[in-house]
Image (cartoon, coloured by chain):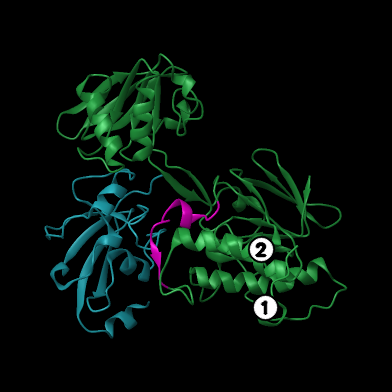
Amino acid sequence: MSKNQLNSMKELINITVIDRKGEKHSLEAPTDMNMNLMEVCKAYELPVEGTCGGMALCSTCHCYVESDHELPEASDAEEDMMDQAFFVESNSRLGCQVRIVEDLDGLVVKLAPEAG
Amino acid sequence: MIKTDIIIVGAGPVGLFTVFEAGLLKLRCHLVDSLPIVGGQLAEIYPKKPIYDIPGYPSVLAGELVDNLMKQIEPFNPEFTLGERAEKLERLENNHFQLTTNKGTVLEAPVVAIAGGLGCFEPRKPPISNIADFEDKGVEYIIRDPELYRDKRVVIAGGGDSALDWTIFLAEVASEVTLVHRRTQFRGALDSVEKVMALSESGKIKLLTESQVVGLTGNGHLDAVKIKHSKEGEKEKETDHFIPLFGLSPKLGPIGEWGLNITKNAIEVDTLDYQTNVPGIFAIGDINTYEGKLKLILCGFHEATLMCQSAFKIINPDKKLSFKYTTVTGVDGF
């Protein structure tokens, strides 16, 4: 999806994604399309694989929440998958389990290193 | 040497359905998969998840879809080589392909269909810088022979069923078992969790939670692991073996070295018939890429169907292919 297409939609929030090289990307994400953070990253062609398609069954969308937004607690499925992930920190989340909602405007996340 | 019409690399849903479409054209298939079971991701990653976009099924569990596909292809007697990874693919003088697996099985066919999905499932390796130095020298990702650990000290890492099950099993075999887990809770079968807790309380095993193995030391063979506790910091623990059990993740693997055009871990194909840049080698399902590609099972089924038409022409250059509906002719197996 191009930035123009995203811009034409209503209910946009801004998200900053810091990639693995430390580069910051400002993304606009629609809140009315039932999207998750992994999908938004992919739409902007950031290096997020999303191998399992968003079922919390791989950890290729693993990221760290850098801003002080309060996210809903991780589900058991997400925690279970985190057990198989590496470089897990206290602010780790799976992007596919983070729903794009209004409250997340201004969210800053950093992509976790790619692992085995 | 196994001879067939189409070698199908990958026994996921698309590979399985290829057998059906090929069978309708009287073409025989042999499937190779690195997993010991059929079904690919559906069986390995999400057998209990419902799928809602298979035409005609408002909802079907992934595992059920695999069972149904196996039933659907039964009349065509597909052959399987499971638990072996397709390793080497060469073209022979007769223009056929020869595929060799990592266990030395050799197959020959005029057509190869790569339905490899995300690639081969391989154990996830913890990102410890020198871990490769100790592989099979104290570090094992898969337990092949439990006797290897008799009267040895073992550190297992992970929080899933396999980590729990092997901890319970090796408690009776090894001289010392330490289970290292990132959290205090365990996923996995409740029964296994309770057993591990009981073993820990009775002192038969050591349980280190909120901990991760972050370093390995040894001289030629593993001597010790460095374990980092989330609050208490690092400490070293002497051990003979370290077994990280973090599940499987897919890797493109040897397919990447078969001379095919690859973009972003996917094989480029012509949408006319999903043939790759090498005539006679097709790529279908999640492993291929083309403009407008969608990684959907139903798209893979379509790709398999068109692919078989071209495969027929390669295999039977002098025969005329007449298109038939199953409603007219039924399914005539062999």
> Chain A: what color?
cyan
Q: Can residue B59 be found in the magenta stretch?
A: no
Asked whether the residues under marks 1 and 2 belong to the same chain, the reply is yes
Most foreground residue, B309 or B77: B77
* Marked residue chain, label 2: B
Query: Mark 1 or 2, which is nearer the eye?
Result: 1
Q: Secondary structure at mark 2?
A: helix
Q: Amino acid at mark 2?
A: Val
B81 is higher (above) or lower (below) than B230: below
Q: Is residue A51 left or right of residue B119?
A: left
Residue labelled with disc 2: B19
Most foreground residue, B180 or B47: B47
> Which class describes the residues within 10 Å of circle 1: few (<14), some (14-19), or many (20+)?
few
> Chain B: what color?
green
Q: Secondary structure at mark 1?
A: helix
Image quarter (top left, top right, bottom left or bottom right) of the C terminus of chain B: bottom right
Residue labelled with disc 1: B326
Residue B135 point in image, percent of width and height: 48, 28
Residue A92 point in image, percent of width and height: 23, 50
The quadrant in which residue B150 appears is top left
At x 22%, y 45%, the residue is: A89
Q: CA distance from mark 1 to mark 2?
A: 15 Å
At x 65%, y 67%, the residue is: B20
At x 34%, y 48%, the residue is: A113
Q: Which residues are magenta?
A: B38-52
Please say whether residue B127 is visible from this viewpoint.
no
Q: Is residue A60 left or right of residue B38?
A: left
B3 is higher (above) or lower (below) than B192: below
Q: Amino acid at mark 1?
A: Thr
